[in-house]
Structure formats: structure tokens, C-alpha cells
Image (tube, helix red, strand yellow):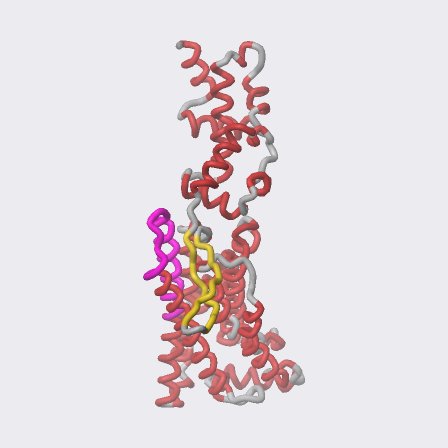
Amino acid sequence: MSEVIFLGSIFCSIITAYLLFFRLPDYQQFSGRILGFSMLFFSLGACIYLLIHSGWILQVPFMFKTAAPVNFLIPPFAYIYIRSVLKDEQKLRAKDYLHFIPAFLVFVNYIPVYFMPALQKQELLQNIMQDFSLSYLTENGYIREKYLFFARMFQSIVYLFFQWKLVVYYKKELLLDKYEGHTNEVMKWLKTFNWLFSSTILGYIILFIIISSDPSLAKSEQIMLIPGYILAFSFLGLSSYLLVQPQVLFGLPYVKVESRSVHDLHIVKNDTVAVPKEYDEEIFQLKKYFEEQHPYLNNDLNINEVAVALDIPAREVSFIINQHFNQRFTDFVNMYRIKYVNQKIKTGYLNKFTVESLSKEAGFSSKSTFNVAFKKVNQCTPSEYIALYAAQ
């Protein structure tokens, strides 16, 4: 049963990571990739966990402890993800690379294991298969396992504290009325994200208390699986949430973070504040551009071309269309194309030309796409619309 749970969580995490890496538009990729890395790190850790508990690790002994450094990357990546969403960040800060130092030190710690002779490593793994507690209580690297276990738990608690601090601060101070609906959706997702991570920390705390109070309990396979089960269900929850609510990946592009100088008793210091951004001007420019320049007549039109023409970041163009017009970019463009088609029909275009030529002129690349878009806008087929117009 445990193997099925782990395999399910691994599969969902890999699929989610794939979607975050390769199916998000460019303007959503930074925070999406940070989250994707978190999913991949978990997948690797869960794979090693499954290999050890199933005994399959004996077939691939070189994989032993490869996930240990990666486990120390999950908390900082989760924190950076929360921060990048709330502050609309699009790249890592210079200081962010300091977060990776613990993972590097853990990697150095396990160098003796990585270069251990094959026969010696096989013997070590066979002993662990017989008594899984050895994985936590022996000294595989330069540092005893229990100290690394405590360090990992402590690191997770510290990062989780700052994750919650970011969410709570934003919730109290920066909630915007104009985009309250979307803001609430994103905040709900971030709180869910934090709660699921909190549950994994709770699992490690329980395990740590059990082992500390009675080391002999570490020999129980089911007890040692406690954090694994919780972690697996947590990442299953994260993957499921994103599949149901993909709009939360837009983040909060309307909150711009700026630095300002704060003068207090002749001391100047830099403070960071979030500045809510309104999009009235951008909405006006977007509508004017489509109504006067007719960019939709180009069947290869994409959101980056619109962004360049308007000098507005593509991420904000997409957010405006999604939130203000309640449409995806493709549907927004097709709406204007169908309006163009409707106008042409009313002015007698079909007296000389066919519907197919009209659809191509309007920017549609195929007849099927045209028919679907036409029915979505007009709630009827082209032939029904033409018959209705002729009757008038």
C-alpha cells in the first residue's frame, strides 16, 4: 500500500513539474519554475525513500543518499516561491544563492558515501534493509544522521515561519478591492501551500519526538514512514489543487514592489513597500489597439507581439484579459475576429466571396477553429447567422 501512495505522489509531482516547466507562458515561468523545482526535489526524495523501503535500492546502490542534499533545497525553494508570487519577482536575488549553502554542505558530508566501494555500499544497504533505523542512527558521512535529521527539521521550521509571515503580512496590509476575487484565490492557494508544508513539518516533529524518547522505536518501519506518508499526501494535495485552480499561477502582477528611503532621526534606510497598480490606462490602450489597428487579422498573432506593440509586459496583458475580460488570450482575439466577420456579413461581403475566404481574412487559420469561435461568440453556426441576417 505504501508503494502505491508513493508512486502516486511521485507521478503527480512529475506531471505537475512538467506542466510548470513547459506549459506555462514565458511571463509566468519564474515562480512556476521555482514551484516546479520544489516538485522535482520532492519526487527525487520520494523515489529514494521508495527504493530503500522496497529493497530496490540494492539494484541501483549509486542512488543512495543522492536525495539528501536535495531535501535541504525544498524549504528555501518553497519560501522563494511564496515571496516571488507576493512581490511579483521575476528573477532570483543575489542573496538568494546563500539559501543553497546547506544543501552544498550536506553534499560534501556524503562524499564518503558517494565514493564508497561498491561491495561496501552493498553491505551497508543490506544492513539497512534488515533494520531501517540504521538509515537514521548510523554515521554514513562526516556528521551523524540524527544531527542532520534535526538540522533538516529546524531548517524547515525556520523557512515555514518566514513563509507564513509573508502571507499574513500581505493579507493584512495589501489586499486590493479592485482585484479582490483574484487576490483571495491566490492567497487561498498560498495558505493551502503553507498548510500542506506545515503538515510535513509536523510529521518530522512527531518522528523526532518518538525517536528521542525511545530510540528502539526507530526500528519500526511503520513509524519511520510517518513523515513519508504525510509528505506524499501533501504533494498529492498540491498537484491536485493546481490542476483544479490553474489561475492561481498568474500570481499578483498588479502589485509592484518598490524601494523607498525612510528618514527617521536623520537615519536613512531602505524599506520595501508594495504599490498596488491600476490597469485602467492599459485596458484603454488594449481596446484601442484592437479596435483601431486590427492586429487580430494576423493569424499568427501572439501575446508577445501585443505586449511589444503596447509596451506592456506580456504577463500583465494576459492578466488584464483574464481578469477584466474574463477570457483567455485566444478567446479574446477570436472575439474580435468574429466581430469583424459579423460586420463583413452585414455589409454584403458574402455577395461576392465565400465564408471560408472571410474566415481567412479575419485571421482564422482553419475552418474548424472559425466554426468553434463563431458559435462561442454568436451562440449559433455561421449558416444560421447568415440565414437570420438575410431574413432581416
Q: Please, is residue 100 above or below residue 310 in the view?
A: below
In terms of image quadrants, where is residue 293?
top right
Q: Is residue 258 visible?
A: yes
Residue 104 on image: x %, y %: 59, 78
Q: Please, is residue 272 above or below residue 293 in the view?
A: below
Residue at 45% x, 73% y is 267
Q: Which residues are magenta?
A: 171-198
Q: Of 286 and 386, which appears nearest the observer?
A: 286
- The image shows a total of numbered marks equal to 0
Magenta stretch: residue 185 in it? yes
Q: Is residue 243 visible?
A: no
174 sits to left or right of 319: left
Residue at 59% x, 31% y is 299
The furthest residue to the front:
266
Q: Quadrant of the C terminus?
A: top left
Q: Please, is residue 220 above or below residue 164 in the view?
A: below
Q: Quadrant of the N terminus?
A: bottom left
Residue 187 on image: x %, y %: 37, 57
Magenta stretch: residue 80 in it? no
Q: Of 382 and 91, which appears nearest the observer?
A: 91
Residue 69 on image: x %, y %: 56, 76
254 sits to left or right of 25: left
Q: Is the stretch drawn in magenta largely helix, strand or loop?
A: helix
Residue at 55% x, 72% y is 70
Q: Of 314 and 38, which appears nearest the observer?
A: 314
Q: Of 387 and 254, which appears nearest the observer?
A: 254
Residue 25 on image: x %, y %: 54, 48
217 sits to left or right of 127: left
